[in-house]
Amino acid sequence: QLQLQESGPGLVKPSETLSLTCTVSGGSISSSSYYWGWIRQPPGKGLEWIGSIFYSGSTYYNPSLKSRVTISVDTSKNQFSLKLSPVTAADTAVYYCARQGRIMDVWGKGTTVTVSS
Amino acid sequence: DIQMTQSPSSLSASVGDRVTITCQASQDISNYLNWYQQKPGKAPKLLIYDASNLETGVPSRFSGSGSGTDFTFTISSLQPEDIATYYCQQYDNLPLITFGQGTRLEIK
């Protein structure tokens, strides 16, 4: 059964870089049928798609975040990663990774990242 | 960018009630629309895909309809375990997607 798990620091200082990794288990990230995506949810607010990556390394970003986001993939480790820089308090959120096709059917449990000095 | 306008933003209903949520796309997205349920502290769960198809294992009281720009999500008989926030999500230009603002559903 495919599982995704987010990991990374829970606290990031303003103006620094948020770095998260999603580890895929129970299946291969090198599937030609799926993208691998990052979604976030600020406290008490809705879901926002951040961006996605294909196993080949092709990336797709939300235009509103594109200038600050980098998503990468490491197929040898079955992982994909998110970097967001520079961060502000507005980037405080629960960050989810998910398998993305026509549907987003497998999600990580989410990790809370707080931006604060 | 395709914008999704979901309404209402919150809804209070009684057990057994029929509940309807709407989602409007800023342009024609055919049937490229999904509905998710999110309970507090949990990741979203897919309920409906391709506008009207029920995901495996999801109770039949949930349904979806629509195409083009206007979509509807219905719970035919509200149950206590349906308390959650519901989101529509379009995928007209994969993998670029957008979510609606969400509808928080409460029990009266």
Image (cartoon, coloured by chain):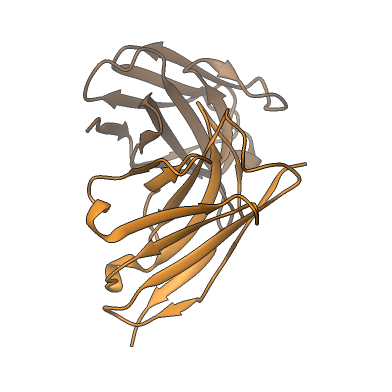
Which percent across, then down, holds residue B83? 56, 44
The residue at the far bottom in this view is A117
Q: Quadrant of residue B27?
A: top left
Above or below residue B1? Residue B69 is above
Residue at (49% x, 58% y) in the render: A81
Which percent across, then down, holds residue A71? 42, 54
Above or below residue A83? Residue B27 is above
Above or below residue A29? Residue A17 is below
- Asked whether residue A64 is in view, the answer is yes
Q: Which of B26/A18 is in front? A: A18
Which percent across, then down, holds residue A99? 57, 40
- Point out the image quarter for the N terminus of chain A: top right
Q: Is residue A64 left or right of residue B34?
A: left
Colour chosen for chain B: brown
Q: Which of A52/B5 is in front? A: A52
- Chain letter for the part of the structure drawn in orange: A
Residue at (49% x, 30% y) in the render: B35
Residue at (27% x, 71% y) in the render: A86
